Image (cartoon, helix red, strand yellow):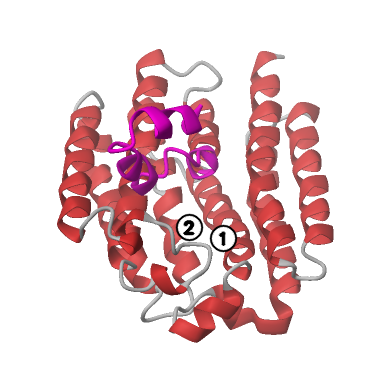
Amino acid sequence: MFESVRARYPDLWPWIQLMRLDRPIGTLLLLWPTLWAVWVAGEGTPSARVIIVFALGVIVMRAAGCVINDYADRNLDGHVSRTKDRPLATGALRGRDALALFAGLLCIALILVLFLNPFAFYLAFGGVALAVIYPFMKRFTFLPQLFLGAAFAWAIPMAFAAEANELPAYAWLIYIATLVWTMAYDTQYAMCDREDDLRVGIKSTAILFGDADRLMIGLLQVLALWPLWLLGRQLEFGWPWYLGLATALALFAWQQWLIRERNPQQCFRAFLNNQWVGAAVFAGLWLQYLL
């Protein structure tokens, strides 16, 4: 589909690339935990309005995050093999184009949150702040994945605020799980670029962990499932929820097998596999409330 768009609308293609609309994996990785929170907050029957606003918000804010990330890396992406063809690196678009697009996407996001209650509206500004801060963290800390996790997980308190107008303590269990899971899969992603990142001076958890990268990813994966297990205990969930978690654990084991030799292509496969982790947990949650 995207190849036909690229051929038919060549002038539009760099903008699509800049927003990463041709690579929906990031949208899915942000969408699944958002849906976990929406479903739990709505006790299995969330309002259609909240579902639609958050689904559209995920698309818009993920695109905005990609745009500001590429703006921050515009002088570095050309030196990394995986990112050298991005539109700001090739000159297809300019830095001011990216800033204008980012501002436009934030305006759309603002319109969306106007359909939510004041509690969720004010929380949205925290999400914007995290989205702006994250891309620049790789210059100053080896933990940019931590900031990405915090940004991705911010949809969790927003979902509870929008659907339930409160932030129960167990909402933060989903927040922690999302943050830690994001750190795990984005470390897999960073393993694909580790050599290039070392050469150009970009910091990441893949570099920080070094030879302990697989062990640390495994620990993060277990730590991501632990708060979800506690959530099930607190809400007295039954076997469907734990079946979803068991499936996620099996997928994590498969990812460990994929990254065992640290081959960049296999690390990227492991990263992509995380979309099924999010889907498995949501399937268990959906079935839990259905039954």
Residue 149 bears which disc, if any? Answer: 2
Which residue in the protein does label 1 denote? 186
SS category of the residue bearing label 1: helix
Indicate the position of residue 68 as horizontal and vertical percent values: 29, 56
Q: Residue at x 76, y 52 (%)?
A: 252
Indicate the position of residue 257 as horizontal and vertical percent values: 84, 59
Q: Residue at x 35, y 17 (%)?
A: 49
Q: Disc 1 and disc 2: Cα gap in Å?
A: 9 Å
Residue 168 found in image quarter = top left
Indicate the position of residue 5 as horizontal and vertical percent values: 41, 29
| Location of residue 54 with respect to 181 vertically, above or below | above
| Left or right: where 156 falls relative to 290 | left
Q: Residue at x 51, y 31 (%)?
A: 35
Q: Are marks 1 and 2 in contact (CB under 8 Å)?
A: yes
| Left or right: where 67 falls relative to 272 | left
Q: Residues within 10 Å of mark 2 (few under 14, many from 20)?
A: many
**Magenta span dominant secondary structure:** helix
Q: Residues within 10 Å of mark 1 (few under 14, many from 20)?
A: many
Tag 1: amino acid: Asp
| Left or right: where 240 falls relative to 65 | right
What range of the chain is rendered magenta?
1-29
The stretch drawn in magenta includes residue 56: no
Q: Residue at x 48, y 66 (%)?
A: 146
- Which tag is nearer the camera, tag 1 or tag 2? 1
The stretch drawn in magenta includes residue 25: yes
Indicate the position of residue 55 as horizontal and vertical percent values: 41, 28
User: In this rendering, does residue 165 appear at all?
Assistant: no
